[in-house]
Amino acid sequence: MTIETKQLTVARAAKALKAREFSAVELTEQFLENITAENPNLNAYLEIFEDSLEQAKHADEILGRGEGGVLTGIPIAVKDNILIEGKIASAASKMLENYRAAYDATVIRKLKEQGAVFLGRTNMDEFAMGGSTENSAFGATKNPHDTERVAGGTSGGSAAAVAADMTLAALGSDTGGSVRQPASFCGVVGLKPTYGAVSRFGLIATVSSFDQIGPLTKTVEDAGLMFGLISGIDPKDSTTLLDESRQTSEKEKMTVGIPRHLFKEGVDAGVLQAFEKMAKKLSDRGHRIVDIELPSISYALSCYYVINFAEISSNLARFDGVRYGLHVDGIDLLGDYTKTRGAGFGTEVRRRILLGTYVLSAGYYDAYYGKANTVRQRITNDFLDAFKTVDCIATPTTPFPAFRFGEKNDPLAMYAADIFTVPANLTGMPALSVPMDPVVRDGATLPVGFQLTAPHRGEPALFHLGKILEI
Ligand code: GLN
């Protein structure tokens, strides 16, 4: 049996599975076939789980009894930094190459309860640091739309897997854009939920005050479905939010603010054109488009990276060659640490640990880390002020489409690509990337995303507007 996976979404497949048009085993077999055809070239998956058909059989038993939830039998790919009990979770690092998770992340537990089928773990930038998946210790992921270009990062494997029909949906994590940026580059939908909406228990920490797990899907409807199933308060993560704080009401007609003052430099002309076309779509549908100013936003990147480095230097201290993963013998205990960390971490990870240690050091804490936290609050206030008059804020997701491998070897050039995505992590606000008209570069048709940001817990507004933009 051949299943046309191109046209299939989570919502459609769920209906077909319930109607027994095909079984979960047949659906899984089809995706495994797609993976065998595509993955050797794209390197989106680091591992295909050998028990995926077993999982599908179990889902079929549930479906056969007329039971199960929306995701029963639905194939899902999982970023390599989210723990699944008994499986390797390497965060695409040599440090954790052979590390097996001892427990399930909360999001995984929730999806298991649904009867979802985990196909495998997807490639990423090492410890979720980067913007292209080139920092993976296990080779870069190629963009399915042009294999000479990056898939984006850090959830590049998850985005490429959805875009190349190697799964129906994937989980990623977003610290400064890592769900939305690869979604933009690969032409899929990506959601960074409100900070605290989704439990981080079982997510390998990068920057604890920024990290959120989010879905990558083909449609906004699917992103909404996935979000509904993975979110909720969790006693194992004290930063999770009460379900009652969710916004349920949504306005039929909304006001969307655009900070055009941000688009002056470094934004690709083709991207801007596609962006204005999407904005017009919203106004044609009766939504009001207004210009807004976010005065402190020019400091967003510097502020983000200071806090990013600081928290990374602290979070990654746990990889000491004793407790987790790799161990390399040195001449004494300190030697063990330096040898293990030198061998286990890649260049970008070491760079960030060093800079983070510096900005947190006694002499520089106030000048860098302390200042960055003040600026973070200012930026949040800018957004809160703007949300007094608008319901959502729109920008392109990325200033340009997917770039070529090696094109952004200079770390600062790579960081500059995050200009539109980091504010949602600084402020904790939810943001959604939906595909807009692609741009053509050197004969290749390259997707780019339109990003909507809402106030805390405003995901329903994002889904409402996002669905309009898809038509
Ligand atoms: N590119 C950003 C960084 O390198 C975002 C990464 C992420 O969201 N994990 O920090």
Image (tube, rainbow, N blue to C red):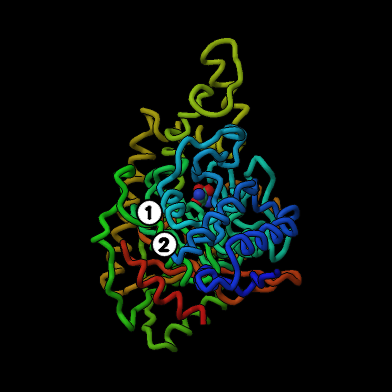
Image spot of residue 145 (x, y percent): 69, 66
Q: Which residue is mark 1?
A: 198
Crowding near the residue tagged with mark 2, few <14, some 14–19, many ≥20 C-alpha atoms within 10 Å: many
Q: Position of residue 141 (x, y in %)?
A: 67, 52
Name the amino acid, label 2: Phe
- Up-down: is 341 above or below 437? above
Q: Residues within 10 Å of mark 1 (few under 14, many from 20)?
A: many
- In the picture, measured across the screen, residue 284 lies left or right of residue 196, that is right
The residue depicted at 28 percent of the width and 63 percent of the height is: 246
Residue 394, horizontal then vertical, whole percent = 43, 71
Under tag 1, what secondary structure?
A: loop
Nearer to the camera, 202 or 52: 52
- Looking at the image, which residue sits at the far front? 65
Q: Please give the name of the residue rendered at 45% of the width and 43% of the height, measured from the top-left corner.
A: 104
- Residue at the left extreme of this rendering: 244
Q: Give the residue number, with chain letter if any, for mark 2.
A: 227
CB-based contact (under 8 Å), mark 1 and mark 2: yes
Q: Nearer the viewer, residue 173 or 339?
A: 173
Compared with residue 338, is residue 194 higher up or lower down, i.e. above or below? Answer: below
